[in-house]
Amino acid sequence: IAFSIITRQPSSTQAKTKTDVGMIDISPYMPKLPPGAKPAGGGGGANDHTTAPVNRGKLPKFQWTQFTPPQVKIQNPNPKLPMDPSLLGPPDLKVSNINAPTFGDPLANGVSESLGHGNGTGIGSGSGGGLGPGEGGGTGGGAFRAGVNGVGMPSCIYCPDPQYSDEARKAKYQGVVVLMVVITLDGRATNIQVVKSPGLGLDEKAIEAVRQWKFRPAVGPSGKSVPTQVPIEVTFRLF
């Protein structure tokens, strides 16, 4: 559990409740491309300002620090400081690759000078320096998984207490809500999905609270903040 919150003492007009909030690790996040020994997450894209399909080509190596992004067509054949192109992600990340003369997506079908229609320095339709439809880096869609491949955990720095729903309070009902969220670089919880809910309006109250929370984003192995996907558990208890 990354953090926990106990609600303030309720007034006499309200049912006494205890709400515990914590980050947990549940089922692994599986990438869409063949994974390596460890789960992946994230993605990237290139904004080539073209409608051409993504080029079918080889992938550069993944590195935690991306000095040179990949290009289909070399813009400067004689750079002053030559460096091998790379994608942003865990160096030991293994995905399907092919032997080709140019960089691109090995699962693409066509040949072009485009590396994608996303936004960033990677390959695909996402944002960031990785591969695929996700963001930040790595591959597999979505954001980095917190606590995996050297990625740290985000922490909550402003967490207003969730409110007990009227239905659950009247029924004296207790339960656990599990949410899957993406913590962005500016510390917001987005892409909130309910993984587990006891019902009676507790999931709505949990989402309502988490939307107001402010997080300190996780830090990647490069020392920079990265967007991460984390599960958050909210336990509603009567006492």
Image (cartoon, rainbow, N blue to C red):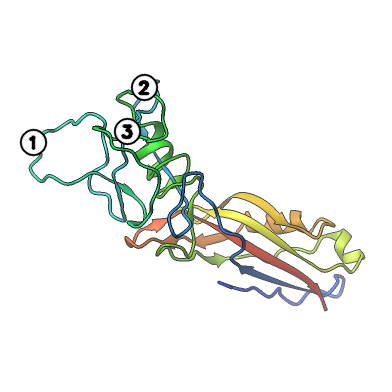
- Which image quadrant for residue 126? top left
Q: Earlier in the sequence, mark 2 or mark 1?
A: 2
- Vertical order, 187 against 135 (above or below): below
* Three-letter residue code for mark 1: Asn
Task: Tell me where residue 17 appears, x and y as whole percent.
Answer: 79, 73
Residue 135: give its label.
none
Q: Residues within 10 Å of mark 3 (few under 14, many from 20)?
A: many
- Vertical order, 156 against 205 (above or below): below
Task: Tell me where residue 171 appears, x and y as whole percent.
Answer: 92, 65
User: At 57% from the left edge and 65% from the top edge, which residue is drawn?
Assistant: 158
Does residue 93 appear left or right of residue 18 in this picture? left
Which of labels 3 and 2 is toward the front?
3
View extreme (top): residue: 51
View extreme (front): residue: 99
Residue named by callout 1: 78
Residue 50: give its label.
2
Task: Tell me where residue 23 appears, x and y as whole percent.
Answer: 59, 67
Quadrant containing the N terminus in the rendered view: bottom right
Residue named by callout 3: 57
* Three-letter residue code for mark 3: Gly
* Three-letter residue code for mark 2: Thr
Which of labels 1 and 3 is toward the front?
3
Q: Earlier in the sequence, mark 1 or mark 3?
A: 3
Examine the rendering and report whether any part of residue 121 can be seen: no
Residues marked 3 and 2 touching at CB (< 8 Å):
no
Does residue 192 appear left or right of residue 58 in this picture? right
Task: Tell me where residue 76 appears, x and y as whole percent.
Answer: 14, 33
Q: Earlier in the sequence, mark 3 or mark 2?
A: 2
Q: CA distance from mark 2 to mark 1?
A: 26 Å
